[in-house]
Amino acid sequence: DIDLMTVKSLRLVQNAQVIIYDRLANPDILKEAPKGCEFVDVGKTDGKHPVKQDEINEILYQCSLKYENIVRLKGGDPFVFGRGGEEAEYLAEHRIPFEIVPGITSAIAVPAYAGIPVTHREFDPAVVFITGREWRERLNWNALAKLNATIVILMGVSNLENIVKKLLENGKNPKTPVAIIERGCTSEQRVVVSDLEKVVDVAKKEGVKAPAVIVIGDVVRLREKLAKFLRNLGNFDHAEGN
């Protein structure tokens, strides 16, 4: 939702000389750029990276040698599984000054638009954000399954079966509610709700596709109570799996 842009990010876009943007950034944002602004598309899709991360880093560096006002436009927050840290690190190594502009991460915004608060005093006292695609296997699934925390997964659709398998094998309650929010915060938002032991089959039946945010935890139960009264849902489509 373009309305979730911060005032600061909008101001920077409106004064940009070049915008290097990702696929998940709302394309209407580019309409806010000034006349003559250059656009560089470095977007990735699930499993397809036409522009490698090393190339993106170098593009940022080369643009810094040519322009004064450069915007690296990402969807959500650059430091929440957005590789913003890697890009900032590369610029620092090349002694290029930069500014970090925090954004509204999909890990919080997408569940909110689906009527799911990621924290609630009556439910789990913690929230954990994980990536569904680890660069290398480092996650302690045993600890995660036993932790009384809401689990929010980004980029997890293609690896859903493996994620569910590991959680169940490590003792996660199979009746734990799960919501998969597809294309969240857009006019094409769709929500599939199930429980942990059935969610893989339900997702296949519903044809769930990336991008999607997955929420695992009892807070998902609040959706049934809240969603019908949420004005920001508008005409968004909701598909409930059983």
Image: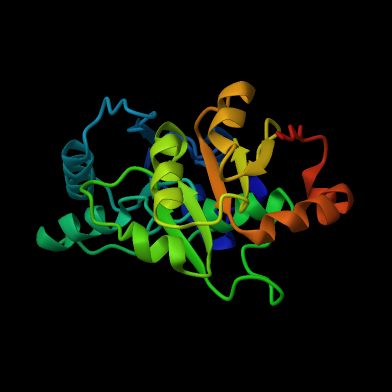
- In the rendered image, residue 166, in percent from the top left (x then y), is placed at 38, 48
As drawn, which residue projects farthest toward the right?
A: 229
Residue 32 placement, left or right of 94: right
Q: Looking at the picture, does residue 203 appear above or below residue 154?
A: above
Q: Quadrant of the C terminus?
A: top right
Residue 197 placement, left or right of 117: left
Is residue 189 at least partly visible in the picture?
A: yes
Q: Nearer the viewer, residue 69 or 158?
A: 158
Q: Residue at x 46, y 47 (%)?
A: 154
Residue 111 placement, left or right of 12: right
Residue 99, quarter of picture: bottom left
Query: Count the marks: how many?
Result: 0
Residue 87 placement, left or right of 118: left
Is residue 31 at least partly visible in the picture?
A: no
- In the rendered image, residue 176, in percent from the top left (x then y), is placed at 61, 54
Q: Quadrant of the N terminus?
A: top right
Residue 6, quarter of picture: bottom right
Q: Residue at x 51, y 58 (%)?
A: 151
Q: Residue at x 62, y 22 (%)?
A: 205
Q: Nearer the viewer, residue 111 or 71?
A: 111
